[in-house]
Image (cartoon, helix red, strand yellow):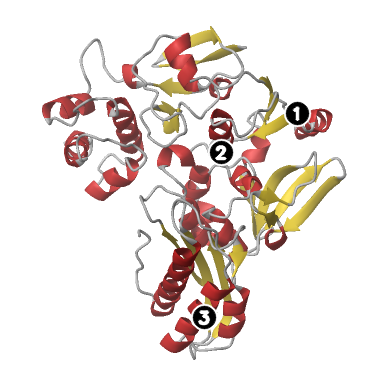
Amino acid sequence: MTLAFTLNGRPCTTEAPAHWTVLDLLRDGLALMGTKYGCGEGACGTCTVLADGRPIRACLVLAAHVRGRTLVTVEGLETDGRLDALQTAFAERGAAQCGFCTPGMLMAARALFIENPAPTADDVREALSGNLCRCTGYTKIVEAVLGAAPGSR
Amino acid sequence: MRLHPFGLLEPESLTEALGALAKLDGEARLIAGGTALIPMIRLGLVKPDRLISLNRLPALAEIRLDGGSLELGAMATHADIDHARLVRDGWPLLAEAVRRVATPAIRTSGTIGGNLAYAEAASDPAPALMCLDAEVRVAGPAGRRSVPIGGFFRGFYEAALEPGEIVTAVRVPPSPKGARSGYVKFTSRSAEDKPLVGVAALVVLDTAGRCGEVRIGLGGAAPTPIRASRAETQLRGEVLSDTAVRAAAESAARESEPLSDLMGSADYRREMIRVWVRRLLVALRDGTPRSNRS
């Protein structure tokens, strides 16, 4: 199966078996290891990526279903090796401990900013409600997202 | 962990999809958003040889007005429905219910047609659609038909779909004038769970505060989503006094036939139906903001 789509701002054409999910395609097909495999059932959120600006679970969506769409993964956040505001805020505020949930958190937060550039703490919690973190207790994650919101800077 | 290998058909018209399903019935499964099917495949609960994807049928994802009724294409996602001005303005109960489905990244993939065809008891949109007297539109080898949503759920995870049939749309008639409505979802563990119980209600009160119209839909209260018809009958024509509301909530709990599972026992569910039916009706009566968070 041939798939053509936009990946992190560049056109991408690749082959993938019909039973692959977006997560299989990213990690095994394209060697982009930033997006993590957590639960495989859509419950933990660490595989969250953006499709046409909206968050999706890479483990639940068939690779075939992103044909022609625009995907952004955690690798697409930086510019020329410089972290973006969200990544910087996570680093500076200690919003990552083991770091396994971080890619999904970053992408869920990025999706929130597209819809709502000046979210409240409740908006942030709602937007991240599908992303589990077993280390931080979420406080620093919510603070980092609020601090990086484009409408509040 | 990879999914077991399957073939994928991607029809580009409904006719083509129906043809493929007729030819492969029994071996193939339809896939819409995949939020229910992919975990089932991963857990080994189903092992289809082929999937027939409905993702290349953009006409099936339309949300539009049709003679005053809302026509939701089966492939419209929960996020599409929530974001549609049309739905928020005319059918706020539905918007409120789809906004409570799982989490943001599930709502962008999960579809209304998929949700109904999956026919789970603890669906968020189903009780709302039952209060709104929706109809499910179906296409199949014998042509097209419309099923009132009250007859669409046949049993535990069983929809009233015949072999070879595809849900194409959900039609929602206009809400009664002056209707007050709401959906409350109670989860016993975390907010993104399926509802332990979900309660949707729609009431129309006359100037004396009597119920002209009263509809109560319940999720997680039986093997399928249900209407609490005994509670409704009891309230019709009555003033929503604290006593009347309490008695109706008691009836709703008694007419429910909940199942026990990991989230809670049947007894606990029945108790929570009593509590949340009462709270929702009181909030609708008083026009007080209700917590949609449990």
Identify the mark nearer the N-term, 1 or 2: 1
Q: Residue at x 55, y 75 (%)?
A: B254
Amino acid carrying label 2: it is Ala
Q: Nearer the viewer, residue A127 or A38?
A: A38
Residue named by callout 2: B36
- Specify the subunit that label 2 lies on: B
Q: Position of residue B121 (x, y in %)?
A: 57, 55
Residue named by callout 1: B27
Does residue B99 lie above or below A30 as drawn? below
Q: Position of residue B141 (x, y in %)?
A: 86, 40
Label 1: few (<14), some (14–19) or many (≥20) C-alpha neighbours in 10 Å: few
Q: Residue furthest right?
A: B142
Identify the mark nearer the N-term, 3 or 1: 1
Whether marks 3 and 2 lie on the same chain: yes
Residue named by callout 3: B248
Identify the mark nearer the N-term, 3 or 2: 2
- Is residue A90 toward the left or the right of residue B66 in the image? left
Amino acid carrying label 3: it is Ala
Label 2: few (<14), some (14–19) or many (≥20) C-alpha neighbours in 10 Å: some
Q: Position of residue B170 (x, y in %)?
A: 66, 51
**Residue B79 in sight in this render:** yes
Q: Residue furthest bottom?
A: B208
- Specify the subunit that label 3 lies on: B
Which mark is drawn over residue B45? none
- Specify the subunit that label 1 lies on: B
Does residue A34 lie above or below B244 as drawn? above
Q: Which picture quadrant has residue B215?
A: bottom right
